[in-house]
C-alpha cells in the first residue's frame, strides 16, 4: 500500500516537467558541430559527467543504431546515418545508484552554441571507474529506450556556453514557460496537447524548430533557471 | 549483448486517450489479483489523492492502478487504467506511471520520455473468475492511413512514428474494427485467472 501511495505521489511530479519535450530533432546531421572543448570529465554539483564522442563511448559497441525497419533506405542514407552517429556525442552522468546515457549534438547558430539531448539507456552505477554496459547492469525498465511499452524518448534543447577552458554552462529551455506561450498563442509552432493527462509535446519538424531557435534562441527569459547546469572540468 | 534499438512494435500506442470522461464505465469485478503463467496482474482502485491533474481527478473513483509483476518479483509495468465500452466490447486505456524503482530515476532522464496510451480489449472479468486481456494492434490503423482511406495525423522520425489521432477518431476506428480478429495482437492475448479479490 505504501508503494502504491508513493507511486501516486509521483504521478503529478512526472507531469511537472520543466524540460521541453520535442519529437523531432532540431539539430540534424548536416548541422552537427564538433568542438574538442566539450569532451572530457566534468562535475556539476554531486554529479560526475562525461562527454565523449559516440565512437569512443561504451555505447559504440552496442547495437544502438536505429533500425528504421519500416523505412526504405538507400545504402547511402544508411551510411550517412552511421556517419552522423559517429559525429555526435554521448553525455553520461552518474549518481550513486544509476548512470544515465544521452545522445548529445551541438550546433552553432547566430554565434551561439545550442545542444540537444535524447535519453538512451541507464545502467546501475559501477563501483569501479569504468563504463561497461551489459545484461547485468541494465535494469529491466520501460525507461530504457528499447522498452517500448508506451514510452518513447524525446529531445530536449538548450544553450551551451564555453565560459572558459574549464567551465561549461548548459541551460535548458523552460518547458513550462514555452508551453504556456504556445497555448496562449504567443509562440507559434506545431504541438499536441492532451489536456486530460496534461501531456504536452512539440511536434514541429526540424526546419520549423530551426527557425524557432533562430527567433527565440537568445531570449534569456525562455531558459529555465532550475535546469541550468554549470560543469567544471575535472581533467 | 544488450540490444538497444528503437523497434517498431505492432501494438497500438496513441498520444490521446480512447475515451472522453462520459464514456467511462465501472465494474468492480475487474479489481483483484490475476495470474497467467509467471505473470501476476494487480488491479486496485487508485488510493485517495490530490496529485492527479485536475481533469483526471474529476473521475478518480473510476481509475484503476494496474501493476504487472513477474515471478522474479520484477514490476514490469505500472499503469493507470480506465474501463470503457465501445460498441459491444470493453477496452482498457492504460497510461504508464513510474513504478517504485523508476521513481528513483533522475527527472532529467525520465522526464525526457513521452508516455503514450496503450489499448487492450478486456473481457470475461464480469464472471469474477477470469480476465481476458488482448492488446490492440496498430496494423489496421496504419493500413488505413497508408491507403489514404482515413486522414489521421501521424508524425514520423527515424525509427518511429507517433499516432496523433483524436479520441473521436480513435473511437470511430475501434467501433469499425473491434469485431475483426485482425484488429488485435494474437500473440498478446492472455486469459488470467483470479487469485484474490481486491
Image (spheres, helix red, strand yellow):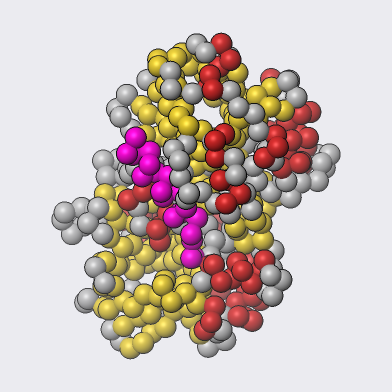
Place of residue A170 in the rendered image (x, y in percent of width and height, measured from the top left): 41, 76
- The residue segment tinted magenta is A1-19
The reply, left or right, for residue B57 in relation to residue B24 is left
Residue B165 location (% of width, % of height): 72, 45
Residue B21 position (above or below residue B105) = above
Question: Magenta part mainly helix, strand or loop?
Answer: helix
* Residue A28 appears in the figure: no
Q: Does the magenta-highlighted stretch encompass residue A138?
A: no
Q: In the rendered structure, does residue A7 fall within the stretch colored magenta?
A: yes
**Viewport quadrant of the C terminus of chain A:** bottom left
Q: Residue at x 30, y 67 (%)?
A: A50
Q: Residue at x 60, y 27 (%)?
A: B26
The picture places residue A56, in percent across and down from the top left corner, at 33, 62
Q: Nearer the viewer, residue B188 or B49?
A: B49
Do we see residue A181 in this rendering?
yes
Between residues A218 and A56, which one lies in front from this camera angle?
Answer: A218
View extreme (left): residue: A128
Residue B137 screen position, x and y as percent = 64, 31
The residue at 43%/32% (across/down) is: B67
Picture residue at 72% right of the left edge, 25% below the top: B178
**Vertically, is B55 above or below B12?**
below
Q: Quadrant of residue A180?
A: bottom right
Amino acid at each position: 500500500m505504501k508503494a502504491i501511495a508513493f507511486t501516486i505521489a509521483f504521478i503529478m511530479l512526472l507531469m511537472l516537467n520543466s524540460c521541453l519535450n520535442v519529437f523531432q530533432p532540431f539539430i540534424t546531421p548536416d548541422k552537427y558541430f564538433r568542438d574538442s572543448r566539450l569532451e572530457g570529465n566534468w562535475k556539476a554539483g554531486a554529479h560526475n559527467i562525461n562527454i565523449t564522442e559516440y565512437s569512443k563511448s561504451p555505447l559504440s559497441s552496442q547495437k544502438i543504431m536505429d533500425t528504421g525497419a519500416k523505412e526504405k533506405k538507400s545504402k547511402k542514407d544508411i551510411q550517412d546515418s552511421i556517419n552522423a552517429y559517429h559525429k555526435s556525442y554521448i553525455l553520461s552522468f552518474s549518481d550513486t545508484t544509476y548512470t544515465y546515457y544521452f545522445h548529445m549534438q551541438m550546433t552553432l547558430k547566430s554565434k551561439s552554441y545550442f545542444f540537444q539531448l535524447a535519453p538512451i539507456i541507464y545502467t546501475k552505477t559501477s563501483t569501479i571507474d569504468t563504463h561497461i554496459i551489459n545484461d547485468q547492469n541494465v535494469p529491466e525498465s520501460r525507461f530504457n529506450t528499447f522498452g517500448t511499452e508506451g514510452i518513447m524518448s524525446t529531445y530536449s534543447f538548450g544553450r551551451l556556453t564555453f565560459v572558459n577552458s574549464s567551465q561549461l554552462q548548459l541551460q535548458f529551455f523552460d518547458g513550462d514557460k514555452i508551453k504556456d506561450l504556445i497555448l496562449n498563442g504567443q509562440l507559434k509552432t506545431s504541438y499536441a496537447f492532451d489536456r486530460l493527462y496534461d501531456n504536452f509535446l512539440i511536434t514541429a519538424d526540424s526546419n520549423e524548430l530551426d527557425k524557432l531557435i533562430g527567433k527565440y534562441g537568445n531570449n534569456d527569459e525562455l531558459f529555465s533557471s532550475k535546469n541550468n547546469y554549470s560543469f567544471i572540468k575535472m581533467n | 549483448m544488450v540490444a538497444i534499438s528503437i523497434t517498431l512494435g505492432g501494438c497500438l500506442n496513441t498520444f490521446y486517450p480512447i475515451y472522453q470522461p462520459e464514456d467511462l464505465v465501472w465494474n468492480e469485478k475487474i479489481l483483484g489479483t490475476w495470474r497467467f503463467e509467471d505473470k501476476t496482474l494487480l488491479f486496485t482502485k487508485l488510493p485517495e489523492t490530490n496529485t492527479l491533474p485536475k481533469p483526471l481527478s474529476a473521475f478518480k473513483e473510476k481509475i484503476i492502478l494496474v501493476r504487472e509483476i513477474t515471478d522474479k518479483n520484477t514490476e514490469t509495468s505500472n499503469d493507470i487504467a480506465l474501463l470503457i465500452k465501445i460498441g459491444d466490447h470493453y477496452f482498457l486505456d492504460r497510461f504508464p506511471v513510474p513504478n517504485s524503482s523508476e521513481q528513483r530515476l533522475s527527472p532529467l532522464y525520465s522526464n525526457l520520455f513521452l508516455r503514450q496510451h496503450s489499448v487492450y480489449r478486456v473481457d470475461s472479468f464480469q464472471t469474477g473468475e477470469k480476465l481476458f486481456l488482448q492488446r490492440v494492434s496498430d496494423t489496421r490503423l496504419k493500413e488505413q492511413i497508408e491507403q489514404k482511406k482515413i486522414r489521421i495525423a501521424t508524425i514520423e522520425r527515424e525509427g518511429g512514428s507517433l499516432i496523433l489521432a483524436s479520441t473521436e477518431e480513435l473511437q470511430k476506428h475501434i467501433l469499425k474494427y473491434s469485431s475483426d480478429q485482425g484488429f488485435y495482437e494474437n500473440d498478446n492475448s492472455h486469459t488470467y485467472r483470479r487469485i484474490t479479490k481486491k
